[in-house]
Image (cartoon, rainbow, N blue to C red):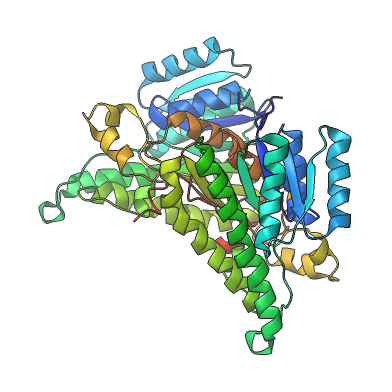
Amino acid sequence: MSAPLAGKVVVVTGAESGIGRAIATVCAVQGARLCIAGIDAERLAETEALIAAGGEAPLAVPTDITDPDAIDRLYAAIDARHGRLDGVVANAGIILHSGPMHETSLDDWDRTIATNLRGTFLTLRAGARYLVEQGEGGSLLATGSSTAVRPAAGGAAYIASKGAVHALMRAVVSELGPHGIRVNLIVPGQTATPPLQRIPGFLEQAAAKLPLGRVAEPEEIARLVAFALSDAAPSMTGALLTVDSGRTTS
Amino acid sequence: MQAVQSLAGKSFVITGAGSGIGHAIALACAEAGANLCLAGRNLSKLEDAAGRARADGAAGDILVAATDIASTESVAAMYAAALDRFGTLDGLVANAGVMAPSPPVQDFDEAAFRQAIDVNLLGTARTVAQGAKILVEQGRGGTILATGSSLVYRSGPFMSAYVTSKAAVHGFMNTVALDLAPHRIRVNLLVPGTSSTPPLQAMEGFLERAAAATPLGEVVSPDELGRFAVFLLGDAVPHMTGAALVVDSGKSIAA
C-alpha cells in the first residue's frame, strides 16, 4: 500500500471530533503531515495523541475560526513548522438549534453563521492566500451538508449556513482554477458522529429513512477527502462529493 | 503511485473498454488487481487492452468479450462469459457510448438521434439492468458505475442527440440508485468533462480550445477517471450512492 498523501501538508479544522477527527487520522495514515485545528483544546489533544500514536505527531493549534487573528496564527504556525501548504479542509461547524425557523433565536442564528460561514470563509481565504502565494496549486475542501441540497424540517440556521458554504465554494472555483487550486465540497448526509449518537434513537430513525438503510461512517468520508487531497484526480474541481446513503437522490 | 485501493479478488465488467475513458478505467482496475471482463465492439482493441494490462503486471484474470450494447442478446452473452469465467460479479462500469455532433436542430436527423438514444441510453440501461439482476440474485451487494457527461450541466451547440442521451442516463442512474439501495448495491455516475480521448485528439486544436475554456486550464485525462473509478468500485466509501462525481476541470461551474 502506497502513501498517496506522502509529504503533503494539510490543515483540518474541527479536528477534535467526528468527521474532522476521522479526516485528520486517515490523512495522517496516508502520509500527510497534519495540522489540526479545533476550538476545544482538550479534545484536540486527544486527536493529536491518536495521530501521534500511529506516526508523525501533528501540529495541534487550538483555534477559534471566527477570529481572523486566530486564523492568522494558525497559518503562521503551519508556515513555521513546515514552510509549505498543500491542502485545506475547512470542516469545523456547529448545529445549535434543530427546531423550526420561527423558534430560532437571533443569538443561535448569529453564532451558527459566524462559525459555519464566517469561519469557513476565514479558513479558506487564508489558505487560498497561502496557496496562491506559494504558486504550486493545491486543494481546498469544505464540509457542506446534504441538507443544503435537500433540506429537512428544522435547523434552518444550520441549513442556510451550509447552503452559503456551497455557494462560496462554487464562487471560487473559477477564481482559483488559474492558480491550479482545486475546490471541492464534501456533502455528508447523516453521519455517525458523537453529537448525533448522543441523541437517543436519532441515528436509527435517520437510517430507516435512507435508501441504503444505514448512516455513513466518518471514516468513509475521510477516505474520500484523502482521495480528493491526493494527486489522483487533478481535473476534479467544483465537485460535490456526496456520501449520504442516497438521501439527496430520493 | 495512487493505487491505495485494491480490487484484488473482485470481478467487474467494463463496457467500452477498447478505447478512451473505458480503456483507462480497465487499465486502472487491472493494476488494482481486479478480474475483468473487457467489453466493446472492436475485439482487436479489447485484446490490445488486455495485452497491455497483462504486460503491466495485472494480477487478476482478464477476459475480453466482443459486445454490442445496442443488442440485448449481446449484453447477455457478455455477462454469461464473465460469470462463466469468474463465477460471481462484484460490479460493472457501463461506460460504452458514442459521441457524434448533431446538425442544428432545425435540420434534425432522426436516424442519428435514435442511434444516440439506442446506444447511450438504452445500451447503458441494458448493461445496468442485466448486471443488476445478477447482483440482486447473488444477494451480497455490489457497485455500479456509469459514465455521464458534464455537458448535461453546461451544454454546447450541435450536440443535441449526445447531450439528450446522456441527460437521460443521469436520470436513469438516479432512479436506479433507489431501486437497488435495498439490495445494498451502490449506483454512482462518473461525470467527465472534455477528456483527452482519441476522437477529440483527432480534431485539430479542439482540446487546446476546450482546455482554455476551463477554470483549471486543462482537459481531463482518462487516467484520472480510471483512478477515480477504482476508488469508487472499492469498499472505501460504502454509503456513497446516487452521487454524480464531476471531474471536469471546473467547467460546469464556471460562467
User: Looking at the image, is B150 positioned above or below residue A94?
Assistant: above
Indicate the position of residue B227 as horizontal and vertical percent values.
55, 32
Residue A23 falls left or right of residue A126: right
Residue at coordinates 62% horizontally, 47% vertically from top-left?
A88
For the residue pair A11 and B190, the one nearer the viewer reads as A11
Above or below, A118 relative to B195: below
Residue placed farthest to the bottom in the image? A102
Answer with left or right where residue A159 lies relative to residue B164.
right
Residue at 25%, 26% in the rendered image = B202
The answer to whether residue B52 is above or below residue A20 is: above
Q: Is residue B140 visible?
A: no
Q: Quadrant location of the C terminus of chain B?
A: bottom left
Q: State whether residue A144 is above or below residue A48.
A: below
Foreground pick, A241 / A185: A185
Q: Is residue B234 visible?
A: yes
**Residue B38: horizontal and vertical position, in percent?**
48, 25
Q: Quadrant of residue B10?
A: top right
Q: Residue furthest top?
A: B55
